[in-house]
Every structure is written in structure tokens, then in C-alpha cells.
Image: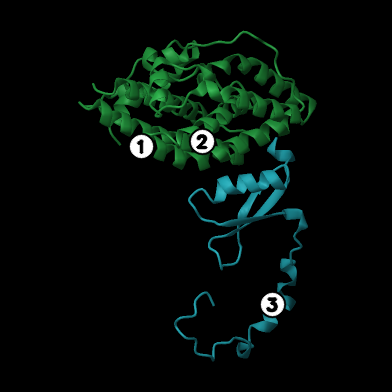
């Protein structure tokens, strides 16, 4: 039966103020079931306060074959990293 | 033992959770998909958690050497007070969900009253359990709708499950002598008062699921008095095996 169910990507926000993060994927017949399944599969040890579900087919992914042109040009441009600033200790989650 | 009525009433509450949990637990690793397998065992664990709270309280009342484990595992079949509904086997996924749903609706109505019990421990257990059981009703109710209003085959299976289990629903609202006495003291819930709302809620959901409400007027009973169906002995043999084979074994 699960073979006919589409795949869903699950995003969970673990605390208020943080962003939703990709937790994994699971099968479900529709969005409502995906939410309930995500609740049971990914948040049963109180990992989350909010869940997003997106059907995997709706995600457009970059092609690994294009990694060279997409990502390598950034590797030698250290000046694009904000590593030259000093951050106060109070600032978290940067 | 003092408070015999209260002790027996706690078992009446707890045994439903224990046996319903045991039936769902049988699906661990055998659910129709990974997701539903985890969901069913989550519900099972919620019910075992509630059972532990009840049995710890019962063990305190009983005193002597009683523990939550001895109450759970070392009674004989006739001493279990669960309703017949919850001991019915997992014939198929529709049966499992129908059984659990028919219990969940009752369970939530019961806890919503029990939270106002004059007995502070029972009231605290009820308050804590309400959130868990609200999710159980939501989960199983959604599945009843899905299968009832699904394909021709899923509809037929769910209808068969509802028809088969309907005869066990009326027992939920039987008031035992202990419960009657304790209800007058504001400790127990008079479950007969839940009956009308229960059948209204169940009828509404089954109708939405395009299922037919069984018209049977004959209902089974006996569980609350310890007279169980033929399935109970097998369930207990499985559940009690470790404690019977290795007495006093601990984790």
C-alpha cells in the first residue's frame, strides 16, 4: 500500500525563534496524513514546535553534475565570508 | 484492604488502557507501513504510561507487596476488568483502527469528566492523559474516514470491522457497583451519562465516512465483571509470559 503513497519532505522547527530544518522524508497519502505521520515519526521525543510538509516532487534540486560551475567559483573568495567581524558573545544562532 | 471500591475502580480504568495498549503493541514491527507502525505503537506507549500511573496508585492502596508490575502481570483472567471491546484481536488494519476509535471516543469523554474527580490523583492522571487521548481520537478518526470513504475494498473492510465491533460498544456505559458508589462521592464518573454524546459523535463520524450505522440491538457484556471473550486468554498468555516463566524478573 505504501508503494502508492507519494514521498514527502519533512521540516521541523525545534524551538520558537529558530528556522524549520529538514528532518527527513516519509510516505503519506496526502498532506494531512503527512503531518500526522511526521508528528509520530519525527517529534515523539519532543523535538519540535512546528512542522512543515512538502511533497518531494515539488522540490527542484540542483544537478550534482553542475556542482563545478555552481559552487567551485565561491571557494577562493574568502572575502565573501563575514569572518572579519567580531561578534558579541550574546548573539546566538549566527 | 481499605478503599476496596477505589482499588477496583482504578483497575476498571487502567485495564482498558493496558489491554488496548497491548493489542496495539502487537503491531510493533508489523504495521502496514513504517509510519503507521510508529503511530500505533506511540498510542500504545501513551496508554501504557497512563496504565502505570493508575497501577502505581492502586499498588499504594493495596499495600503489602503489590507493585505496578504485579498488578499488571500477575492477575488471573477473571480479575481483569477491561471491557470486551479492547481485547478484540487485530484481524486487519481496519479492525485495529475501528476498535481503537470506538474506544478513543469513549476514553476522551470519560477523562473530560474524570479530571473533575474529588480524588486528586485520578484528577491529575486524567488531566495529563487528555492531550494524549485527544490525538488518539484524531488519528483513528481520520483513518476511519479515509478507509470508509476510500476505495471499494477499504470501505467494505471498514464496514465489516464496525459491524463486527458494534456489539461491544454498549458495555462501555455499564455502571459497576464500585463506580456507582464512588460516583455519588464525586470520585468516579457515571459513565451512563456519556452514552448519548458518544453515539452522537460516533454516528456523525461514521456518516461522514460514508459508513452505515449498525442496527443491531443485541450487545455483548461481561468484561467489567471479569467474564471475557475467548481472545483474552491468549492475550494474557502472551503478555504475562515473562513474569510467569521467570517470576520476579526485572529489567
Give how far apart the Cα atoms at labels 2 and 1 are: 15 Å
Sequence-wise first label, 2 or 1: 2
The colouring scheme, among rainbow, by chain, secondary structure or one colour, is: by chain
Chain A color in figure: cyan
Q: Which residue is mark 2?
A: B112
Horizontal and vertical percent position of residue B119: 36, 34
Give how far apart the Cα atoms at labels 2 and 3 are: 57 Å
Between marks 3 and 1 in the image, the one whose residue lies nearer the viewer: 1
Horizontal and vertical percent position of residue A76: 63, 87
Looking at the figure, which quarter contains the N terminus of chain A? top right
Furthest-right residue in this view: B152
Q: Which chain is green?
A: B
Q: Which residue is mark 3?
A: A71
Residue in the image at 29% along x and 26% along y: B70
**Regarding mark 3 in the picture, which secondary structure is present there?**
helix
Mark linked to residue B157: none
Tag 3 and tag 1 share a subunit: no
Question: Does residue B27 appear in this view?
Answer: no
Horizontal and vertical percent position of residue A41: 56, 47
Give how far apart the Cα atoms at labels 3 and 1 are: 61 Å
Question: Does residue B40 appear in this view?
Answer: yes
Q: Quadrant of residue B57?
A: top left
* Chain label for disc 1: B
Q: Residues within 10 Å of mark 1 (few under 14, many from 20)?
A: some
Amino acid at each position: 500500500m505504501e508503494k502508492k503513497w507519494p514521498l514527502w519532505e519533512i521540516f521541523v522547527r525545534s524551538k520558537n525563534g529558530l528556522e524549520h530544518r529538514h528532518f527527513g522524508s516519509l510516505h503519506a497519502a496526502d498532506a494531512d496524513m503527512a503531518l500526522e505521520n511526521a508528528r509520530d515519526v519525527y517529534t515523539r521525543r519532543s523535538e519540535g514546535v512546528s512542522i512543515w510538509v512538502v511533497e518531494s516532487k515539488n522540490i527542484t534540486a540542483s544537478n550534482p553534475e553542475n556542482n563545478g560551475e555552481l559552487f567551485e567559483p565561491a571557494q577562493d573568495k574568502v572575502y565573501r565570508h563575514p569572518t572579519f567581524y567580531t561578534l558579541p558573545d550574546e548573539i546566538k544562532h549566527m | 484492604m481499605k478503599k476496596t471500591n477505589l482499588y477496583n475502580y482504578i483497575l476498571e480504568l487502567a485495564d482498558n488502557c493496558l489491554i488496548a495498549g497491548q493489542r496495539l503493541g502487537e503491531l510493533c514491527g508489523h504495521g502496514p507501513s513504517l509510519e503507521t507502525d510508529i503511530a500505533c505503537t506511540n498510542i500504545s506507549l501513551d496508554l501504557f504510561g497512563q496504565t502505570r500511573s493508575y497501577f502505581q496508585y492502586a499498588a499504594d492502596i493495596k499495600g503489602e507487596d503489590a507493585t505496578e508490575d504485579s498488578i499488571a502481570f500477575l492477575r488471573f483472567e477473571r480479575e481483569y476488568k477491561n471491557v470486551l471491546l479492547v481485547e478484540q484481536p487485530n484481524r486487519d488494519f481496519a479492525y485495529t483502527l475501528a476498535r481503537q476509535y470506538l474506544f478513543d471516543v469513549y476514553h476522551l469523554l470519560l477523562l473530560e469528566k474524570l479530571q473533575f474527580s474529588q480524588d486528586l490523583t485520578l484528577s491529575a492522571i486524567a488531566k495529563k492523559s487528555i492531550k494524549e487521548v485527544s490525538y488518539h481520537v484524531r488519528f483513528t478518526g481520520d483513518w476511519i474516514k479515509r478507509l470508509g470513504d476510500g476505495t471499494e475494498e477499504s470501505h467494505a473492510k471498514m464496514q465489516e470491522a464496525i459491524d463486527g465491533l458494534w456489539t461491544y460498544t454498549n458495555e462501555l456505559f455499564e455502571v459497576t457497583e464500585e463506580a456507582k458508589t464512588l460516583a455519588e462521592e464525586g470520585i468516579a464518573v457515571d459513565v451512563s451519562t456519556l452514552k448519548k454524546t458518544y453515539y452522537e459523535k460516533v454516528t456523525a463520524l461514521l456518516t461522514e465516512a460514508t459508513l452505515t450505522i449498525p442496527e443491531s440491538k443485541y450487545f455483548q457484556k461481561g468484561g467489567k465483571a471479569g467474564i471475557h471473550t475467548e481472545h483474552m486468554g491468549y492475550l494474557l498468555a502472551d503478555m504475562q509470559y515473562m513474569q510467569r516463566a521467570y517470576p520476579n524478573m526485572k529489567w
